[in-house]
Image: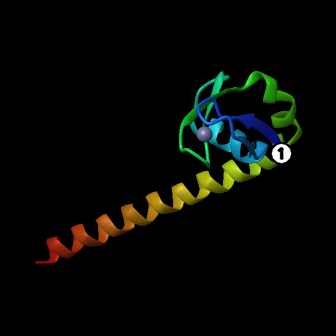
Amino acid sequence: MITHTCFKCNRRFELDPVYVGFELRKLKKNNPSFYQAVCPACRAVNKVSVKPMQAELDQVAEEIDRMYAEYEAQKAQERAEKRAKAKAKASESAAK
Ligand SMILES: [Zn+2]
């Protein structure tokens, strides 16, 4: 676990490296330098430097890959469903 101290309220909170890695991956940026963590106590957005977390992120890289692959698969499925719906709608109105 990564611990971070909120810049605003000084509360310490934990970050799950798998989740952090997953969120960073979703940014689709090469080597993002910050992770934006929301403090659970005061909701302030904390910019957490990625560098000191890198070792922990590397340790769970496989889990992050898996989580991201599932996320992508789900998104692809949603897109396919949307397309199928649009197609059905189009043929419905064409039949009229
Ligand atoms: Zn806080």
Residue 56, visible in the rendered structure: yes
| Residue closest to the eye, 63 or 12 | 12
* 27 to the left or right of 13: left
Where in the figure is residue 2, as x and y percent of width and height?
Answer: 80, 39
The correct choice, above or below, for 34 with respect to 58 in the image is above
* 41 to the left or right of 55: left
Where in the figure is residue 39, as x and y percent of width and height?
Answer: 61, 42
Residue 51, picture quadrant: top right
Q: Which residue is at 15% across, 77% downward?
A: 95
Residue 38, visible in the rendered structure: no
Q: Which residue is at 68% across, 44% downward?
A: 22
Which residue, as the protein is rendered here, is positioned at the far front? 9
Mark 1 CB lies closer than 8 A to ligand 1 = no
| Mark 1, secondary structure of its residue | helix
- Residue identified by numbered label 1: 62
The correct choice, above or below, for 19 with respect to 25 in the image is below
Q: Residues within 10 Å of mark 1 (few under 14, many from 20)?
A: few
